[in-house]
Image (cartoon, rainbow, N blue to C red):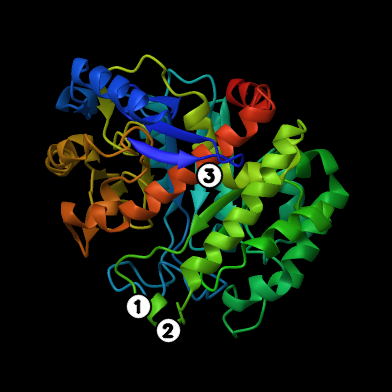
Amino acid sequence: MLFFTSRSNSRYIYNHIDNNIYLYDCNETNDELSNLNESLEKIQFLFPSKEDLNKNSTNTLIINITDNCNLRCSYCAYSEHYPFERDHNTNSISLEYAKKAIDEYLKRSTHLQTRLINLYGGEPTLHFSLIKDIINYSKTKSENIQFSINTNAYSLTNNQINFLINENVLLQISIDGSKTRHDKYRVNIKGDGTFDKIKNNLKKIYDKSIEYYKNNIVFIATLAPPYQLIELYNLYNSDSLFKNPWYINYVKPLDTTFLDAISLKNSREIFKEQEKFLAEEYISSAINNKAKDHFGHWFFNKELLKVHFRNMSPSSKEWINGCCRPGIDKFFVDSKGFYYPCERSGDFMNIGNVHSGLRPNNSYSIIKAYADDCQNCANCPNVRFCDTCYLGAKRGYELDVSRKYELCHLRIEKLKMILYIYTSVLEKNPNGFDYLNYIEQV
């Protein structure tokens, strides 16, 4: 159980056993929940079986176009600060290997109304001719493919922009905040800031097609200490170019020396203050039915959706944290033609290659060891919302299940913040989150 208060200082209990939120009424509530929980089964964890992994099904393909990049972001997972990840290099996937991965994916995605292929890097637009070849080849095989590209948008040309618009490609563009904030870490090979050039390219896209810009571009921010969440909030509010959807990431905190070079004094406290400010602003917007236009929606929505659509009659079975079904939910092909569960896997959990084919069962021993350890999480108040996965239990190149507990306190803090937001809004406006119903349907 998790005790928390709302903005009005009303006291609540979130009970992870039955997945409900209760007003706290001292002994009466405690006795009621104790009796309830004794009557319910202990949570057991579900995980992919060998039979599941043998299914000829995949939802998304991610192709690593190149390991090369035109930026040298200080916190990059492929920098010298991450000794267990690959380095920046000039390797690029061959069109032959890309075609093999695409063919494999197409055979495994016949169940989808819209297939999804993401082009990744490095910086994929450095090899734009390969992007064109991949898209053109895929279109000869299937008419229902949606392409997306993860890009820093630093080197886009007019011709490239025209192609992306004509092909209706989704763009996931990295921006960390204002010019000052963005240029602190996101620099080019010479060490110069990149914000101005990227913004200029964004303006080119906007001027060519406002409709494409609004419908096809999302921004990805990577938060690193010293945290400047408010700068990101102000950028969203002050510049129409950045009024699109956002996804928020954090610097990868494990197996890295990046944080060693930064003063972390009071960084957590500063971040909590900024998060609380944003939460209060978002609560006020939600009470006034304006939450969907507030930046706080993009910062809190992932967790809010989980709470808002939680199963109010939960089963005693729970999926293992935020884990995927390797090869089924998606698979990633690197520049050498090896398959992994996702773009963040590095050399961990290899599940085949373009020659032998996709072999999700190769990951079963890691999945089973991780799932067995998850039985220890049954009494955690965050058990139904936790987003950690196999990679959160990786130390170096090996699985170390003890590692996943290192950040549990931060995940529980986040849950308390989400519950605070959720109850504070509903106390004043029971319909304050109705807009999430539309988002979920879309």
Q: Which quarter of the picture shows residue 46?
A: top left
Secondary structure of the residue carrying tag 1 is loop
> Which numbered disc flags the more N-terminal residue, 3 or 1?
3
Which of the pair 181/382 is nearer the observer? 382
Give the position of the C terminus as an image quadrant: top right
Badge 3: residue crowd in 10 Å (few <14, some 14–19, many ≥20): some
Q: Are marks 2 and 1 in contact (CB under 8 Å)?
A: yes
Q: Which label number is shown at residue 406?
A: none
Residue 324 visible in the shown view: yes
Q: Where does residue 86 sit, x and y in percent of width and height?
A: 34, 68
Q: Amino acid at mark 1?
A: Thr
Pointer 2 residue: 261
Secondary structure of the residue carrying tag 2 is helix
Q: Which quarter of the picture shows residue 373?
A: top left
Residue that extends furthest to the right in the rendered view of this protein:
207
CA gap, disc 2 and disc 3: 40 Å
Taking 260 as reference, is 4 above or below it? above
Residue 56 visible in the shown view: no
What residue do we see at 57% from left, 81% from top? 189
Q: Amino acid at mark 3?
A: Ile
> Which numbered disc flags the more N-terminal residue, 2 or 3?
3
Pointer 3 residue: 134
